[in-house]
Image (spheres, coloured by chain):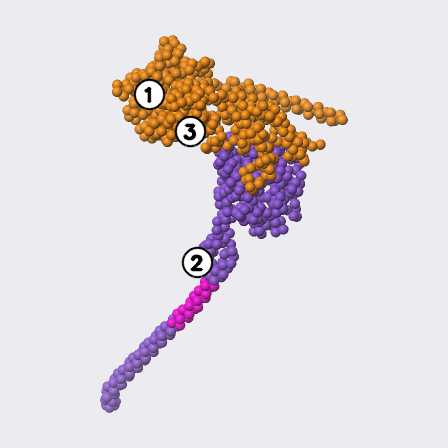
Chain colours: A purple, B orange
Amino acid sequence: MSISRRRFLGWLGAAGVGTTVGRSAHAAGNTHFTGHPDSLGVLFDVTRCIGCRKCEEACNKVNELPAPPKPFGDLAVLERRRRTDAKTYTVVNRYENVPGARGPLYRKIQCNHCLEPACASACFVRAFAKNPNGAVTYDESVCVGCRYCMIACPFEIPTYEYDKAFTPRIMKCTFCHPRLIKGQLPGCVEICPAEALTFGQRRNLLRIARERIGLFPDRYIDHIYGETEMGGTAWLTISGVPFRDLGMREDLGTTPAPELTKGALSVVPVVASMWPVLLTGVYAISQRRDKIAREEKTAAVAEAVAKAQAEAKAKLTETMAKAEKDKKAAIDREVKKALEEAAKAKAQESAAAPTAAAEKKPS
Amino acid sequence: MTKARSLFNRTGRILTLAALMLAFAILSVQGSAPSAPAGDDSGMPRADIIRIDGLQQFGRLERPAVVYLHEKHTQALSKKNKDCATCHLPDKKYMSTKFKRLKDSSKKEVMDIYHDNCTPCHRETAAAGEKSGPVVCTGCHQEREVASSWKEIGLDKSLHSRHVKAQENKCEACHHQFDPVAKKLVYVKGKEDNCRYCHLSQTVDNVISLRLTAHTQCIDCHRKRLAENKDAGPVFCGGCHDAGLQAKIQKLKDIPRLMRGQPDVTIIQTVKSGGEKVEPFARMSVVPFNHIGHETYSSSCRSCHHSSMDACGKCHTLQGSKEGKFVKLQTAMHRVGAQASCMGCHDRFLSDKRCAGCHASMPRRDPPDLAGCVSCHMPKPAAATPETEPKVMAAMLLEARQPVTATYADEDVPETVEIKALSKQYEAVKLPHRKIVQTLVKNIKDSKLAANFHRDPGTVCQGCHHNSPVAKKPPACASCHGQPFDGRNLFRPGLQAAYHLQCMECHKDMGIEKPSATNCAGCHKEKL
């Protein structure tokens, strides 16, 4: 069935109306979300980190991860820029010769536990959950291994167990969720000798960060990384040098990841539920219109045929009548002609008869 | 075995060959380095870069401004025995700093002066077979980046003193004032000011800019002295403005005190906005000021007297005045970060390694720590009467305030402090407490500034025993610091972090590299 321009536009219009209706209904039900009340977090102070890798060691231990090839006491590992992998939830990297710094600087990398996590919003089986305590946790039992979370995360944190053929999992820092539930500190926080990691309620951490920046304005950059980045993260960072110099993205904006995809994703239920009805309706209407048109066409054709037939008949009748008339006229004319000729002959005959009689008489 | 040996042999040979080649490569690179062309276009930073963009005053430039290297031209001219007058016309008193003209008449004229004078000279020089400048438009009019070594120069006390000597104490040779009645420049003895007070960065009305002043008056004098075969200052750009040459300017060891009617000691006079002086002690304890002492710490009067030779309080009144740009006396004296304020200057010394160990971790509060007020603000001496002159009062107060870095007697300072906080994992740490105190005191012993602020024997202790009253037996760290992340003491680190931050930060700030922060065993002996 070919689609006419008009019909295509009709469908498009219907789909458009359906989408806008769905969106405004969704927006009306949404409010500004600033994180779960009293949720926990960690403030990482770059100026305090001494790069001892104790946090890496504690993380490895409490999460029962496989032992690394080199021991944690080996600080030569810091010479290479590393990232989290399936066997490492957190790494510390060293940054040498940063302008404005007196010596090498260190940055701890782990899941930042976003207030509105991109990984969770990208996961269509809801394998990720933002817990009210702040931790973003992962449920391997429902994971289908699509790794959308890895693409979604702006901090490149979730990693995948590529070496497992049958039961690969997404691996990332859990904020020591099981320990938090038991009232224990996260492994890394507990071991940090210099309190470079401060643990507490996120709102208190923001106060602490502001206090430090306020008391030592020369020592800190006046920004708390994670307060607003991607809508805010549970883990916050303060630093004495620009965050980009520590390999931290400064282009993330303040919009939470789900907000960015909300528009498109909120349409999905509408499309799934309403579009079939709508499009079926549109289809039915167009079908009905087709049917009527067909019927009308048939009727018109029939009428036209009838009319033509009638006209032909009339014409025939007329022609025939005319022919009859002509015929009659011709007959009449012929009859008349014959009669005239007969009369003429009769007259001639009658004139010749006396003569013949006369001629016959002498004889 | 034989095989293995031959393998070693071969590897050894290959390695030796490789090493030789590497050595040769390095040598050849090093050998070629000195033969790099040196000279004018060597890319060395220069102090004589002039951007000829004067036509800007007549509107947008049609072509890129000319980057003109002044010394390149003076050198070329001196080879031909030509002097400044080749390019610069004589003005009323001094030679004009403009090229071949006295004033900028019109765009066309100024442009023509350059084009009609530069190009022919370049052409003639080239015709004579010498190295010459461009003769086509883009040769001069092009965007060029030339590394600059230009540095502002000022007359510090040493240089001023050398000028005084050269001028045979004739201050009027340079210093003058405008007499509004006679409408001319006159010299008034005892009213000598810094050039910059009147000659600002831009020419205002009849007062020419500092730049123009220096490039006419200074250079004119230097040239005259050169002509007379006398010891003279520089006449070319780099002599004054090249950072390297500037550092080589001879410094006098003993600089005679510059006298301009200043007191030896005085009290900081507070003045109300109307000009009415506030009686000393009418409101606050007064601040005696050792003027003669401070003169030796600063390279020029301008360090404090930034806009006039008057007393601070004249412009910076109690409530602020227009002359003082509404900066109140309080702000003018206390603002940390300001160039000329008392605390601004004192604060800069705190980044010194000897001070930073304690002071870097002390927040700069505004208003400042009130306990420190008495270091400067002093109570009325018993002998003072209402008739006591400010100078005498100041002398009395300063007499009572002998700068001595005080500390407790050795026996009152514990020799070692045992820290057993991590005793489960490590042996107790024996902190060499007395040695630390002695080192801190020794470091600042010779500083009069430090001595003035560490007069109380407990002050040095406050470097570590902070946030508690000064005492011979201050509270132990564990009195305040305990479990970390205590919601009731949000801003207080736990005990472990308190120790580590205190020790590590101080070591870092003082430049003490050993033991490194990551070397646990450097302080904590492993438990056997």
Decide which of tag 1 and tag 3 comes sooner along the chain. Answer: 1
Q: Which residue is pictured at 39% across the width and 19% down the height?
A: B262
Q: Residue extending furthest right? A: B1
- Select label 1 or label 2 by which is in front: 1
SS of the residue under disc 2: helix
Q: Which residue is mark 1?
A: B98
Q: Amino acid at mark 2?
A: Gly
Q: Which residue is mark 3?
A: B284
Q: Which residue is mark 2?
A: A10
SS of the residue under disc 1: loop
Q: CA distance from mark 1 to mark 2?
A: 78 Å
Above or below, B246 against A129 in this view is above
- Give the x, y percent position of residue B464: 56, 30
Q: Which residue is pictured at 37% across the width and 28% down the height?
A: B317
- Give the x, y percent position of residue B134: 38, 22
- Asked which quadrant contains residue B19, the reply is top right
| In the displayed structure image, the side of residue B80 where residue A71 appears, left or right | right
Q: Amino acid at mark 3?
A: Met
Q: Residues within 10 Å of mark 2 (few under 14, many from 20)?
A: few
Q: Which residue is pictured at 62% across the width and 42% down the height?
A: A86
Q: Nearer the viewer, residue B509 or B251?
A: B509
Q: Is residue B119 visible?
A: no
Q: Which residue is pictured at 49% across the width and 30% down the height?
A: B371
- Asked which quadrant contains residue B240, the reply is top left
Q: Which residues are magenta?
A: A284-307
